[in-house]
Amino acid sequence: MTAVVEYCVNSVGVDLNTASVALLSHIAGLSKAIAQNVVNWRNEHGRFNDRKQLLEVTRLGTKAFEQCAGFLRIMAGNNPLDASTVHPEAYPIVEKILLTTKQPLKTIMGNTSVLNNLKPELFTTDKFGIPTVNDILKQLEKPGRDQRPEFKTATSIDGIETMEDLKVGMILEGSVTNVTNFGAFVDIGVHQDGLVHISSLSDKFIKDPHFLVKTGDIITVKVIDIDLNRKRIALSMRLDEKTADTPQQHRNKPQTGKNASSASSTKTSQRNNTLFSNSVMGDALAAALNKKR
């Protein structure tokens, strides 16, 4: 869990003026003690307005500053770059870009037409190569951009809230909640996960479902069977897969009235016929054994 938090905060960054000690302590270069000192400085002097003020924090030296500064954001500070992923050490590259374009920072930030025409190789240094310059240009193009991928959710259909609302043949979107060796469980918004069996994951042979889907994936599925009594939903990612002629939810409902009596009579008749047949076969077998003797 700790590794996940560290990955997130060092990928996205944190707001220096609102982050807690617990969150700050996950930033590269900040121990729990230094993180507490950052909060203490903030409590004593007010909000940070410049990343360089971090050097005023007790025990936060130059090396720690080099490690943490790029991950700490200052919104509405003195320098707009302090709200970006651009590290203070790379600010001279931005200054060189401003001199080349002859435009102020506030004007060039978000100005795609100007930034896309710049050649990254013109702004490299002994310390920063083309990949770093490209990152800086992207950050200037979309200031404060969130580097995390877009969070997607399954699109629900109005009126589909419980298993009773489902019908065989429906095409729905769902979120994969678990992947096993025999298939994938999918949340389709009816408070009961459905199962896409491994045989219904693809038209091709799939040895391991993990090669095709993972938890959190948004997929499109077809309802191929519903069992209300046992609360089971069979789904398929093969949208052209044929479904049962009679919906399972009807087959599993308890029969009442004349239908129940008729079904009971039919079962009794079938059972009696089976017993009679077994009895006749038994007599014939006994007669054959007696002849041999």
Image (cartoon, rainbow, N blue to C red):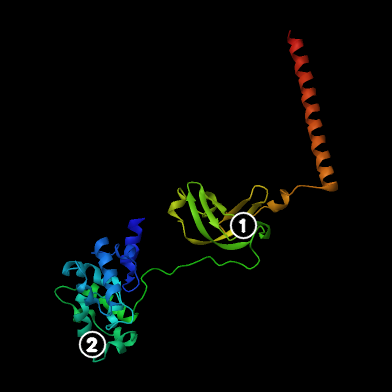
- Name the mark nearer the viewer: 1 or 2: 2
Q: Are marks 1 and 2 in contact (CB under 8 Å)?
A: no
- Of residue 121 and residue 53, the one placed in the foreground of this image is 53
Left or right of 204, for residue 24: left
Left or right of 276, for residue 198: left
Residue 240's disc number? none
- Of residue 149 and residue 36, the one placed in the foreground of this image is 36
Left or right of 73, for residue 180: right
Q: Position of residue 40 (x, y in %)?
A: 28, 69
Amino acid type, mark 2: Leu
Amino acid type, mark 1: Val
> Residue placed at 53% from the left, 65% from the top?
154
Q: Find the residue positioned furthest to the front.
A: 44
Q: Quadrant of the C terminus?
A: top right
Residue 31 makes an appearance in the image: no
Q: Find the residue positioned furthest to the bottom.
A: 102
Is residue 269 depicted above or below 222 in this figure? above
Is residue 291 depicted above or below 163 in this figure? above
Q: Find the residue positioned furthest to the left.
A: 126
- Of residue 284 and residue 230, the one placed in the foreground of this image is 230
The quadrant where residue 36 appears: bottom left
Mark 2 highlights which residue? Answer: 98
- Of residue 191 and residue 288, the one placed in the foreground of this image is 191
Between marks 1 and 2, how big is the CA–CA gap? 58 Å
Q: Position of residue 184 (x, y in %)?
A: 51, 52
Residue 223's disc number? 1
Give the secondary structure at mark 1: strand
The quadrant where residue 270 appears: top right
Mark 2 residue crowding within 10 angstroms, few (<14) / some (14–19) / many (20+): some
> Residue placed at 73% from the left, 10% from the top?
292
Q: Position of residue 114 (x, y in %)?
A: 30, 87
Is residue 264 depicted above or below 47 in this figure? above
